[in-house]
Image (cartoon, grey):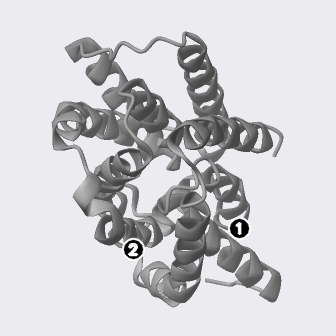
Amino acid sequence: MQLDLFDWVLIIICSVIWGLSKSGVQGISIVAVPIMAYIFGSKQSTGIVLPMLILADLMAVKYYSRHAQWPYLLKLLPWTMSGVLLGTWVGDHLDEAPFKKLMAAVIVTSVVTMFWWEKRKGDRVPDYWWFAALMGIAAGFTTMVGNLAGGIVTIYLLAMHLPKDQFIGTGAWFFLIINVFKFPLHLFVWHTISWPSIALNFSMVPFIAIGFVVGVYLVGKFNDALYRRFALIMTGLAAIVMLFQ
């Protein structure tokens, strides 16, 4: 990897952002997506950052694991894995330019859907198999083509009306399982992971940890209602930033 000082500064910033995101600071990770795409290219960056995300997921699972709600996860995971496989096939047939457009389209769809769902203001949990299937496939597809499933998973977990800690804990386990599932696909199908990229990821562990610790402190200041609004607003703002890159 030929990286200059400016590239390293940007990668460190992104590492802190990943840590913040996995601690429960929703939406902020979407800011790091275009930065990494700028440095490494849209498709290549999706694999390069994956081990970094897994390391951050491990921190989140360690801290929030006791709050995970497994019934919701077990409904979502099989469909998400199907979406990952679909995203792998689609992404493998796209060049860099259309791949970038696909990433932008995914963000627009995710955010519009998220705000539409929240505006309904219903307290009833949509406990239907087709809702989990739709959210799962969408999350799997979006996480594979751009590590952009955060908005979709936010929709699903907000729709389940989970308290803050359960929201974060369930999401932590979800992303750890799915990101580990994606790893061999990036390694053997897309060839976006290499030994130099893995070494880069491990060198960023201190900065991921700093972001995570700061994020845990910030999230602790929110009650459930305020955190719900915060998750929506941050994801929406971050999506707008991504669209204008």
- At 47% from the left and 29% from the top, the residue drawn is 155
Quarter of image, res 202:
bottom left
Quarter of image, res 115:
top right
Task: In this rendered view, identify the residue nearer to me: 21 or 68.
Answer: 68
Task: Note whether residue 80 is visible.
Answer: yes
Categorize mark 2 by other alpha carbons within 10 Å: few (<14), some (14-19), many (20+).
many
Relative to 207, is 138 on the left or the right?
A: left
Q: Secondary structure at mark 1?
A: helix
- At 52% from the left and 90% from the top, the residue drawn is 203
Q: Quadrant of the N terminus?
A: bottom right
Give me the disc on residue 55: 2
Task: Note whether residue 180 is visible.
Answer: no
Label 2 – label 1 distance at C-alpha: 21 Å
Task: In this rendered view, identify the residue nearer to me: 174 or 95.
Answer: 174
- At 43% from the left and 37% from the top, the residue drawn is 153
Name the amino acid, label 1. Ile
- At 20% from the left and 16% from the top, the residue drawn is 129
Q: Position of residue 133 (x, y in %)?
A: 27, 21
Quarter of image, res 79:
top left
Relative to 188, is 164 on the left or the right?
A: right
Numbered-mark total: 2
Name the amino acid, label 2. Leu
Q: Position of residue 187 (x, y in %)?
A: 33, 65
Give me the disc on residue 16: none
Q: Secondary structure at mark 2?
A: helix
Frontmost of labels 2 and 1 is 2
Categorize mark 1 by other alpha carbons within 10 Å: few (<14), some (14-19), many (20+).
some
Judging by the rendered image, the residue that carries numbered circle 1 is 39
